Amino acid sequence: MFLLLAGLGGGLALGGSLRARAQAGQDQEAANIAKEVKEAPLRYMKNGEKPDSTGDGPYPATKRQVDGPPDLVAYYPRDLAALGDRKMPIYIFGNGACSNDGASSRQHLLEIASYGYLAIAPGGIYSGPAVKMTPKSFSEHRDRTRAVQLGEAINWAVAVNKNPESPFHGRIDTAHIAMSGYSCGGIQALKYAGDSRITTFVIMNSGLLDKSTPEMGEMAGDKGLLDRITVPILYVLGGKQDIAYPNGTDDFKRITKVPAAVISTDVTHQGTYNEPNGGRAARAVVAWLNWRLRGDQNAAKWFVGPKCRLCSDPAWTVERRNF
């Protein structure tokens, strides 16, 4: 539901019939963007009426507004004692449209948390079954976060892990952190390329804009950022009708020195964030996190080998490098 709202994948030097095809492609992209602009507010409100999932992992999850500052929404197992000695790796998530609605992808984040992760999104709880939403309120929350807030979320997690008065005291694995985000939030996440705290990236329905697109606030980010990535990275895209598809696949082509994958399923730019338990994209992300943050070799089978689980699933296309 959250848009890149920019011309994507343009700027190719083409001649003759190739130029005509490029123009047709750009026209289709413009039509896709216009469709998203029209449909996003109503879809946002409809999704907001759905009850929260608890995830299908072993630890039913919940969410709460963190006592700020900073303004954050935390997602975690409802019964922390059920974790026993198991600690929670951290999943930082930049919201679509760089919104400050930290509940806008709540089904996805609850699913991640149900597998024993601490997921954190910037902002407050401005959507959900108990929240009054209007097209105006949807618009008011857009473009209200900054990339620096994702780093503040890491700092908060480190602090509460050390605080003996916090329910999270000693329960967080601060050495294993995934930096993620949806659309504009994915670009915010990429701005942490080279940050030594990050163990892996998960970039969803997103990618850095090319030079033909004017820089726009939080959407600005040079492709040179990709050269600073030193850890494994996963792109999750919504098929060729996803307005971020050209950018995400272009990013992947440029990342040549670290383990990288791009997986895509035909769900458009809206993804599966608001399906119960976050839909199939969330399940794939859980597998990546279990592999990259916990070293789970069964989870690695989702991505590794000619007969990997996603490779054998007709709902997905998969490209990999340096595995």
Image (cartoon, helix red, strand yellow):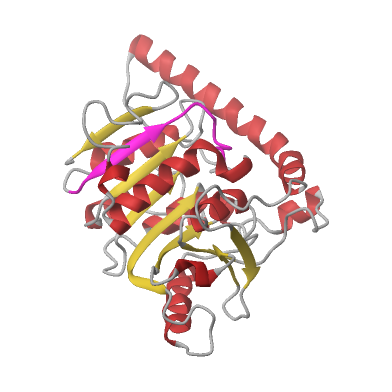
The residue at the far bottom in this view is 164
Which residue corresponds to the image point at 49% horizontal and 17% vertical from the top-left?
24
Q: In percent of the image, x 54 and y 31: which residue is there?
A: 268
Q: What's the residue at 24%, 41% (across, down)?
A: 254
Q: Magenta: predominant secondary structure element?
A: loop
Q: Is residue 296 left or right of residue 204?
A: left
Q: Is residue 265 magenta?
A: yes
Q: Is residue 222 visible?
A: no
Name which quarter of the figure residue 103 lies in.
Answer: bottom right
Residue 48 position, x and y percent, is 74, 48
Q: Which residues are magenta?
A: 258-272
Please say whether residue 216 is one of the residues in the magenta stretch: no
The reply to whether residue 169 is in sight is: yes
- Is 226 positioned to the left or the right of 10 in the image? left
Residue under the image location 21 percent in, 32 percent down: 305
In the rendered view, would you say 60 is above or below 71?
A: above
Q: At which x and y percent is residue 264?
A: 41, 31
